[in-house]
Image: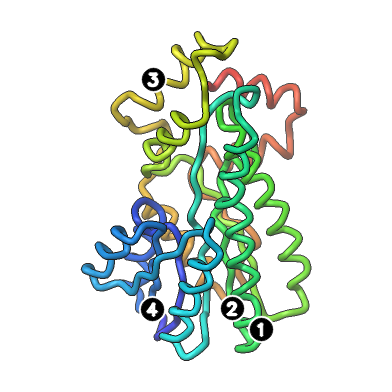
Amino acid sequence: MADSRSILITGCSSGIGYAAAQGLRARGWRVFASCRKEEDCVRLRAEGFESPRLDYADEACMAAALSEVLAATGGTLDALFNNGAFACPGAVEDLPTGAMREVFETNLFGLHGLTRAVIPVMRAQGHGRILQCSSVLGLVPAPWRGAYVASKYALEGLTDVLRIEMRDTPLHIVLIEPGPITSRIRANSVPHFERWIDWQASPRVQQYRDRLLPRLYAPPKTDRFELPPSAVTRVLIRALEAPRPRPRYYVTVPTYIAGAMRRLLSTRVSDWLTARAQ
């Protein structure tokens, strides 16, 4: 059991973040379960969580949230789990640069800003763990997900460099790489798709009708190999509580398959398999 160790988790309104907040609180961690929307924070506070509002795309909001956490702990923080992210589906040729900027503002730039703000706290206290929630799509690509894939590829690279640079410090930097996990990310992506993607004017209009729209608008169904968010929580606990955590942790069978594909297959073969799976 952990004793009064503190962790800040982003993206706790549902899915992976919410399950992580519940699971770690049950193990005795002091959990700061942040959300982007105040109404979600209010709901979590009613459940007994300390829940600062934290929006990666709002630097002032992010700074205020971290200040609130540090004021509550007396200036310390044992762990940070960067989990918040969103997607804007659509073919790359139809994806406006503005949509890419918005995805990167949250999925990479905001996450990076919070990470930088936390590092001095952890240096001063002499320990700390920073865990980044990447994805199987940080290892292999998938059609219709160009913005999300690009942000996760970038997160993988940034985190790998940070891990190497932090070798001379007492900080541990860890990548968590889930595959299909039950969450609201697909439903939450619909407003971004509708705002940014003019699919009816696309040369791929029929592909949108046949492939992407049914996935976005049909009633949700469980994908093959999909696991509940608690599967990520179990791995997160190992990464947080192991004396010497691994640099990366895979979650779900597809992530293990993707890792093997990167090591063993040529790009042509990998592309062929990925295209057939869609």
Badge 1, how many Cα within 10 Å: few under 14, some, many 20+?
Answer: few
Badge 3, how many Cα within 10 Å: few under 14, some, many 20+?
Answer: few
Q: Residue at the location (65% across, 52% down)?
A: 155
Colour treatment of the image: rainbow
Location of residue 183 by image quarter: top left
Q: Nearer the viewer, residue 128 or 35?
A: 35
Q: Nearer the viewer, mark 3 or mark 4?
A: 3
Callout 4 amino acid: Arg
Counting residues from the N terminus, which is met first, the one under dot 3 or under dot 2?
2
Counting residues from the N terminus, which is met first, the one under dot 4 or under dot 1?
4
- Is 210 situated above or below 11? above
Q: Which residue is mark 1?
A: 123
Q: Nearer the viewer, residue 271 or 87?
A: 87
Callout 2 amino acid: Gly
Q: Which residue is mark 3?
A: 214
User: Secondary structure under badge 1?
Assistant: helix
Counting residues from the N terminus, which is met first, the one under dot 2 or under dot 1?
1
Check whether the beta carbons of the residues at disc 3 and disc 2 lie within 8 A of each other. Answer: no
Give the number of the disc on residue 128.
2
- Is 228 situated above or below 207? below
